[in-house]
């Protein structure tokens, strides 16, 4: 490309970023007027969607996980649906099925009835309560962006995002997601308890005669434009090197291994590097910046990496956690 072409491309990116950053800020404010005390969760959910990915929300009941997904759907102008996962849920309950129709003339034909997966934003509530067969049906749809029923392919709507939830406490009657399926989620987001001031605001704003109602700040076309822009934002060499160093140091047997690396049984693959690369760009756009920084890499390292690695038995016996190991790996970069 010539110098003029590069300059014109940069101008287009700058103008697009300025316009879309305004839309994204409006969406963030609209969500924050409904969801209190979960700023980091909201930001990470928005980063996941801007990156074109899916998120796994981990938190005890009553922390507004369902409310967050509903609010995201309204604010971003997406068609949102919710599925409560249970042990008897079948793949057809999510994907849809073919039914036999008979016309008035007696002619019979099959007709496809779409399931709730045909949404732009799907909440998979307590995903680990469904059988592995049902989990894999949804996770295949997440990866392939289409489903196949009776040999016929059906494309999912665009954009298509899944926000799945898990309760970390009650594990009876659950089917934990295998590691290969966890890797399909761009981020694992911990939903913590709100602080005292936020909980005070929740008490007054949600138990009165009137409650705040989510308002649309974007639409699906604007979101798709933002997702395309995320992939065009420039990334400096120092940020790329930080991503590579961090992800590769989280794998066992890497050259120059330290004590933190020795505690790791298995680590993240290249998909983690891809996820982190997209996430830091999306984080920059969310904050109204034109390029990500190393701070973005450090802030997003834990939600991107922690569900993609496991510790050795010896490390767990010594009381180490994945969170602590990631913090040690981050300290080598920061």
Image (tube, grey):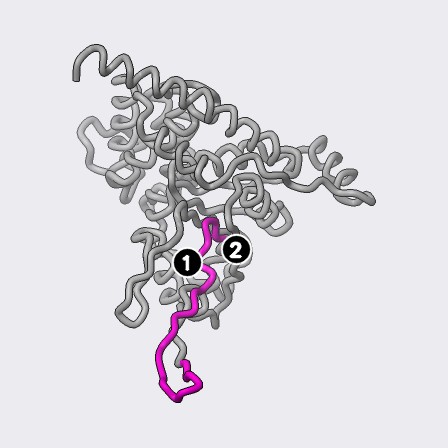
Helix, strand or loop for disc 2: strand
Helix, strand or loop for disc 1: loop
**Is there CB contact under 8 Å for labels 2 and 1?**
no
What is the crowding at mark 1: few (fewer than 14 residues within 10 Å), some, or many (at least 20)?
some
Which residue corresponds to the image point at 50% horizontal and 63% vertical from the top-left? 85
Quarter of the image holding residue 193? top right
* Residue with the mark numbered 1: 176
- Marker disc for residue 240: none
Give the total number of marks visible in the rendering. Answer: 2
**Which corner quadrant holds the N terminus?**
top left
Q: Magenta residues?
A: 101-122
Earlier sequence position, callout 2 versus callout 1: 2
Please indicate, yes or no, whether residue 320 appears anywhere in the rendered image: no
**Which corner quadrant holds the C terminus?**
top left
* Residue with the mark numbered 2: 81
Position of residue 119 measured from the top left corner of the image (x, y, whole percent): 46, 54
User: Residue furthest toward the right?
Assistant: 209
């Amino acid at each position: 490309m010539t110098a003029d072409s590069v300059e014109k491309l940069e101008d287009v990116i700058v103008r697009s970023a300025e316009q879309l950053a305004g839309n994204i800020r409006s969406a963030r404010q609209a969500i924050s007027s409904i969801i209190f005390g979960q700023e980091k969760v909201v930001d990470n959910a928005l980063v996941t969607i801007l990156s074109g990915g899916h998120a796994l929300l981990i938190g005890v009941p009553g922390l507004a996980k369902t409310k967050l997904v509903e609010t995201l759907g309204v604010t971003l102008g997406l068609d949102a649906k919710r599925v409560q996962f249970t042990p008897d849920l079948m793949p057809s309950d999510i994907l849809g099925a073919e039914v036999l129709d008979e016309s008035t003339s007696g002619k019979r034909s099959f007709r496809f009835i779409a399931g709730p997966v045909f949404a732009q934003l799907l909440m998979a509530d307590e995903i680990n309560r469904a059988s592995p067969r049902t989990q894999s049906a949804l996770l295949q749809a997440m990866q392939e962006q289409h489903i196949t029923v009776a040999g016929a392919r059906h494309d999912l709507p665009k954009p298509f995002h899944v926000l799945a939830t898990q309760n970390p406490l009650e594990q009876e009657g659950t089917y934990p997601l295998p590691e290969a399926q966890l890797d399909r989620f761009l981020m694992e987001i911990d939903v913590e308890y709100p602080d005292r001031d936020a909980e005070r605001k929740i008490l007054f704003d949600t138990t009165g005669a009137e409650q705040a109602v989510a308002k649309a700040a974007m639409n699906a076309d604007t979101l798709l434009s933002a997702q395309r822009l995320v992939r065009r934002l420039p990334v400096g060499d120092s940020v790329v090197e930080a991503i590579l160093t961090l992800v590769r140091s989280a794998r066992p047997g890497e050259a120059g291994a330290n004590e933190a690396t020795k505690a790791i049984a298995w680590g993240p693959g290249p998909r983690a590097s891809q996820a982190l690369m997209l996430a830091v760009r999306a984080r920059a756009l969310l904050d109204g910046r034109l390029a990500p920084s190393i701070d973005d890499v450090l802030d997003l390292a834990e939600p991107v990496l922690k569900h993609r690695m496991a510790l050795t038995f010896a490390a767990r016996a010594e009381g180490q956690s994945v969170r602590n190991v990631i913090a040690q790996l981050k300290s080598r970069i920061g």
